[in-house]
Each structure stands twice: as structure tokens, then as C-alpha cells.
Image (cartoon, rainbow, N blue to C red):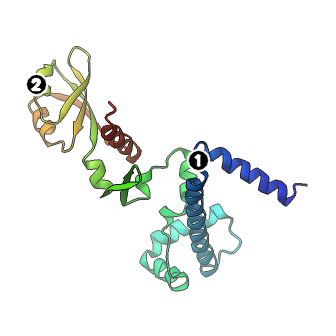
Amino acid sequence: MITSEEIKRRLWEGANELRGSMDASRYKDYMLGLMFYKFLSDKTLETFRITAGVEKATEKELVEEYINAKKEYGEALEKMIQDVLGYFVSPEYLYQIWLKDINDGNFEVQKVADRVGIIRKGALVEIASTEDLIGRSLTRAIVQFEEEVSPSDLDKVPNVQILRINDNHRAYTLEVRGEMNGLIKTLANYPVLDLEINKPSLEEVFLKYYEKKEGVE
């Protein structure tokens, strides 16, 4: 039988391994924040469990019931929980959903953040919406043409850089900074077979931002 001390020891060892090289005091701030958010999510689900009369549901079943109830009742469900707790955690923002997405490999920061602050050397240097930050960042476009297109025709498009040329100048991988309008207008003059546009994740935006500020190419 595992004692409570053994459980504490194993939890501590696991948390310490996750911490890696991060300073313990900083790691504590992250962990306390996550623990508090889990508490808020747990209380939201528990309130729903009682008011919806699904006391015997497992946590997985409870989350599914909560998601379906939100789709069916919308703001009425929010108000019901807010009247009891004074706050409401929407299903897509539950800690339990974050954990599932992480385990499935589908978690992205922009799913849980509307605005972000960028800190460099201990100072807050920018606050912006995630949509604005991603919109101002680099976008990757893969273009497949029906016929050969000269690189010089694409080089002259503002804010567009050619990363790769394949298939005898019929396929291009491009990087676009900011708006796509210039590239789209240029492509309208050519027979395009396929166009794939990939917006960066918020993590990729952060990496590019810090590389740019530190002068790393």
C-alpha cells in the first residue's frame, strides 16, 4: 500500500522533472496559477453536476454533458452557474479540456488567450490581441502554378520572400510578412493550380519575435 508520504514524494519528483532548468521561484508561480485555474474549473463542473442532476457521472461524462448543455442552453447555463459561484468557465476553457488537448497533441495557446503580453529582460514591451499579433507575423504560402513562373515576378511583390523553388519554377514556397493582398493580386495574373496558406501558431510568433529582437536569423 502506498503511503501519503510516498504519494507526495512521487508528485514532487514529477513536478521537479517537469521544471527542468527553470528557476524554482518562477516555476512555483506557474504551478500555483494552474492549480488555481483547475480549482475554478472543478468548481464550475461540480456546480453543473449538482444543478443538472448528474451526480453519478464520471468526470469525462460530466465534461461531455457540460459541453452539450452549453450548446443547448447557452447564456441561461452561464447565468445559472454565475448565480451560484459568481463566475463561469466556458466548456472550451476548462482545465480538463486543456489537459485533453495536450494529451491529444492539439493544444495551442491562442485557443485560451485573446490578448498576450510580451516580456523581454523583465520588462513588458508589448500588449496585443492574438489575432493582431498573428496577423502582423510571417505567413507561409505554397503555390503550385500550371506553367513556369520567373522568380523575378514574385521577388518584386512587397513583403514576399521566396524560400524554395521546385518543379522547374512551377512550385514556390513563400514567406509573407503582414497582409496577403499584394501576393493575391499578383497570383491573379497567373494560372494557379493550388494555393496553401499556413498561419503561424502563437508559439511560432513568439519565437520569431525574440529571434528578431535578439538579432538571430
Q: Residue at x 37, y 45 (%)?
A: 206
Viewport quadrant of the N terminus: bottom right
Give the amino acid at mark 2.
Answer: Asp
N-terminal-most mark, 2 or 1: 1
Q: Residue at x 32, y 30 (%)?
A: 217
Query: Eyeballing the image, is 118 above or below 198?
Result: below
Q: Is residue 50 visible?
A: yes
Q: Position of residue 71 (x, y in %)?
A: 46, 69
Residue 10: image tag: none
Say which residue label 2 marks: 153
Label 2's element?
helix
Frontmost residue, 37 versus 216: 216
Q: Residue at x 58, y 49 (%)?
A: 23
Give the amino acid at mark 1.
Answer: Asn
In the image, taking residue 20 as reference, residue 194 lies left or right, namely: left
In the image, taking residue 181 as reference, residue 202 lies left or right, namely: right
Residue at the farthest top position: 168
Q: Is residue 64 visible?
A: no
Contact (CB < 8 A) between labels 2 and 1? no
Q: Position of residue 163 (x, y in %)?
A: 26, 25
Label 1's element?
helix
Say which residue label 1 marks: 103
